[in-house]
Amino acid sequence: DAKTTQPNSMESNEEEPVHLPCNHSTISGTDYIHWYRQLPSQGPEYVIHGLTSNVNNRMASLAIAEDRKSSTLILHRATLRDAAVYYCILRDWAQGGSEKLVFGKGTKLTVNP
Amino acid sequence: DTAVSQTPKYLVTQMGNDKSIKCEQNLGHDTMYWYKQDSKKFLKIMFSYNNKELIINETVPNRFSPKSPDKAHLNLHINSLELGDSAVYFCAVQDRSSYNSPLHFGNGTRLTVT
C-alpha cells in the first residue's frame, strides 16, 4: 500500500487559514491524492482529491507539489465545525480492480474559538 | 433522508453471541463496503460488494460474514462474538461507474462485547 505521513495533530484559531500537510514520497504516477475528514462520532466525509494540478471546491483547496511527493489541504477560514481528524489517502487498487482506500492515522485538527 | 444509514447505532452484547449490523443506502450506488475502526482509531477495510458480488475480502475471521440481499443493502453478521470485536463498524457506498468517485460513509455502529 502506498503510504502517507501526516502530523498527529495541529491547532488553529477560528477564522484563520489552516494548512494541513501530507507527505507521500512513494506515490506512483497514477495515484490520486484523496482527503477525507472524520468529525467526532461520525463517519469519514470526502473533502477533495487531485492528481497533479491544484484543486478547489466549496470545502477546501488542495495544493500538490510539482514532484507530487507532498500535498497540502487548505481550509481558507477555519470554523469550529472543521475540528476533525483529516486523512490524506492515496488510491489503492485491490484485487478485481476495485478501489480500496487505505486510511492512516490522520491529523487531528483542533480549532480554538 | 440519510444517504447511508446503519442500524443499530449502538450494540452491546456478550461474548459468544451472534449479532447483525445492517446498512442501507438510497444513493443507488453499485458498491458497498464495511470498514472497522478499532480503539486506536485505525480505519480498516473488511469487505466490499459490487452489484451484490463480493470483490474485496480482507483478512477477516470467518466469524464475519457479509450478506447483500439486494443492491441497496449490505449487512454484516458476526458469529461467536469476542472481546476483540469491540469497535465502530462503518458502512460506505460508492458509485464505481464514475471514476474516482468518493466514498459516502454511514455514521457507524458502535459494537461493545462484554
Image (cartoon, coloured by chain):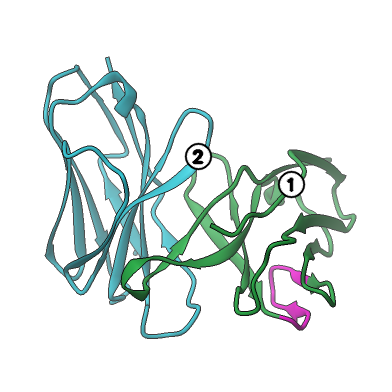
Quadrant for residue A88, please give it.
bottom right
The residue lying toward the viewer, choosing from A7 and A97, is A97
> What residue does disc 1 label?
A80
Q: Position of residue B91 (x, y in %)?
A: 34, 53
Q: Position of residue A71 (x, y in %)?
A: 78, 65
Q: Which mark is residue A41?
A: 2
Q: Residues within 10 Å of mark 2 (few under 14, many from 20)?
A: few
Label of residue B106 in the image: none
Q: Is residue B2 visible?
A: no
**Label 1 sits on what residue type?**
Leu
Q: How many marks?
A: 2
Q: Is residue A49 left or right of residue B39?
A: right
Chain holding disc 1: A
Q: Residue at x 50, y 78 (%)?
A: B100
- The magenta stretch is A52-62
* Real-space Cα separation, disc 1 to disc 2, in angstroms: 15 Å
Numbered disc 1: secondary structure: helix
Q: Amino acid at mark 2?
A: Ser
Q: Position of residue B7 (x, y in %)?
A: 25, 45
Colour used to depict chain A in the structure image: green
Question: What quarter of the picture does the N terminus of chain B occupy?
Answer: bottom left
